[in-house]
Image: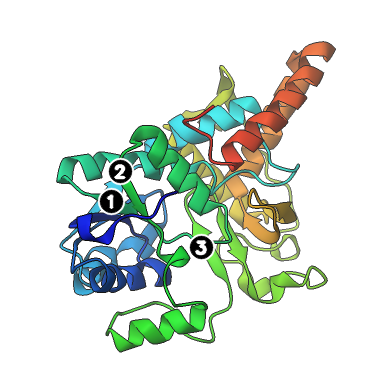
């Protein structure tokens, strides 16, 4: 992506999570882009109470506004369910929890940028990860003319510790310290963990790492039966209770969490060519995908089932590679 011309940037819309990276980006943008106005956009995808301080933190960090958009139902119905119907799983283990959230966020970044008359959209994805591509492909598919600012490809901060020091120097309240271990991404579908001791594939995940589900060893030693009703490839009810898409995920998360369901440990091939280890907690997703696959195995004939397996792999690759609006 071409770099934005700094002299043309007066107003920037920032994809804002309230975490370390995006909190530091607010003053950095103002320092390096002509004291531009920064408008934050936060997508509520079911992160829970971690979003409570986001609005005030954004303003204290220098933003002029902070939109917090409740996108939970849109997220599950229009981004998760199509992947469930396709049976899309990346490299046999990854249920795409971050991948299909990014095009949804990109869409609303563009919408807010148009509403506010912004000159550029900024994000906090690193220069080595997948999300930089996902955000930028999504934004450019929807508005080819808007500028994109990717601070991680420009700034002098090269490590998490340097970011923490920068935040302290600018009096930015941050929820992490030098001793914090993992890089995490959370929504109602999953919680991902990367970095720290996980960089060595010999190391097993530590129990203290898990924030959503319990380990199978800590789960009750008894059965719990769950009944899912599907219509046209997506769940519509849990244990006989009709629920909205987001409520279905919430209900199944409760069940999966208490039973130690949904932990996945994978060394995946990033779209930028690197290998990366991730540990994912996806309780509801694991239940839904398992049930959906069993239904297809029951209902589809041999040729259709085998052909669909190949299509599911390609579908997952498109989503993983950020081509939601491009394919």
Horizontal side of 183 relative to 3 (left or right) equals: right
Asked where in the image residue 320 lies, by quadrant, the reply is top right
Tag 3 or tag 1, which sits nearer the N-term?
A: 1
* Cβ atoms under marks 1 and 3 closer than 8 Å: no
Q: Which residue is mark 1?
A: 120
Residue that numbered label 2 is attached to: 146
Could you tell me residue 309's position as x and y percent?
A: 76, 25
Q: Which mark is residue 126?
A: 3
| 36 is higher (above) or lower (below) than 133 | below
100 left or right, relative to 165: right
Q: Does dot 1 land on a helix, a strand or a loop?
A: strand
Q: Residues within 10 Å of mark 2 (few under 14, many from 20)?
A: some
Which element is circle 3 on?
A: loop
Is there any visible trace of residue 243 in the rendered image? no
Camera-nearest residue between 87 and 285: 87
Left-right relation of 161 to 24: right
Instruction: Categorize mark 3 by other alpha carbons within 10 Å: few (<14), some (14-19), many (20+).
Output: some
Q: Badges 2 and 1: C-beta atoms under 8 Å apart?
A: yes
Q: Earlier in the sequence, mark 2 or mark 3?
A: 3
In this rendering, the answer to whether 126 lies above or below 240 is below
**Distance from Cα at disc 2 to Cα at disc 1:** 6 Å
Q: Is residue 324 above or below residue 49?
A: above
Instruction: Classify residue 274 by image quadrant.
Output: bottom right
Q: Position of residue 171 (x, y in %)?
A: 27, 85
């Amino acid at each position: 992506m071409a770099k934005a011309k700094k002299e043309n940037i007066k107003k920037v819309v920032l994809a804002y999570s309230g975490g370390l990276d995006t909190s530091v980006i607010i003053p950095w943008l103002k320092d390096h882009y002509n004291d531009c106005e920064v408008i934050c956009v936060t997508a509520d995808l079911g992160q829970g109470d971690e979003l409570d301080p986001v609005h005030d933190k954004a303003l204290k960090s220098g933003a002029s506004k902070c939109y917090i958009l409740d996108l939970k139902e849109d997220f599950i119905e229009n981004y998760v369910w199509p992947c469930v119907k396709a049976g899309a799983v990346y490299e046999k283990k990854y249920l795409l929890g971050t991948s299909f959230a990014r095009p949804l966020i990109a869409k609303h970044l563009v919408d807010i940028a148009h509403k506010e008359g912004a000159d550029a959209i900024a994000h906090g994805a690193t220069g080595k990860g997948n999300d930089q591509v996902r955000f930028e492909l999504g934004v450019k598919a929807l508005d080819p003319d808007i500028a994109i600012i990717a601070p991680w490809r420009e700034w002098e901060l090269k490590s998490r510790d340097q970011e923490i020091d920068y935040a302290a120097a600018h009096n930015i309240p941050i929820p992490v310290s030098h001793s914090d271990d993992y890089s995490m991404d959370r929504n109602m579908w999953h919680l991902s963990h990367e970095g720290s001791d996980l960089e060595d594939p010999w190391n097993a995940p530590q129990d203290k790492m898990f924030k959503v589900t319990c380990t199978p060893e800590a789960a009750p030693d008894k059965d719990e039966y769950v009944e899912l009703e599907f219509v046209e490839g997506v769940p519509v009810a849990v244990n006989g209770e009709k629920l909205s898409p987001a409520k279905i995920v919430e209900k199944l998360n409760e069940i999966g969490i208490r039973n130690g369901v949904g932990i996945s440990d994978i060394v995946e091939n990033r779209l930028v060519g690197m290998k990366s280890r991730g540990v994912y907690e996806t309780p509801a997703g694991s239940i839904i995908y398992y049930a959906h696959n069993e239904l297809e195995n029951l209902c589809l004939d041999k040729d259709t089932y085998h052909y669909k397996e190949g299509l599911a792999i390609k579908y997952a690759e498109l989503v993983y590679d950020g081509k939601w609006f491009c394919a």
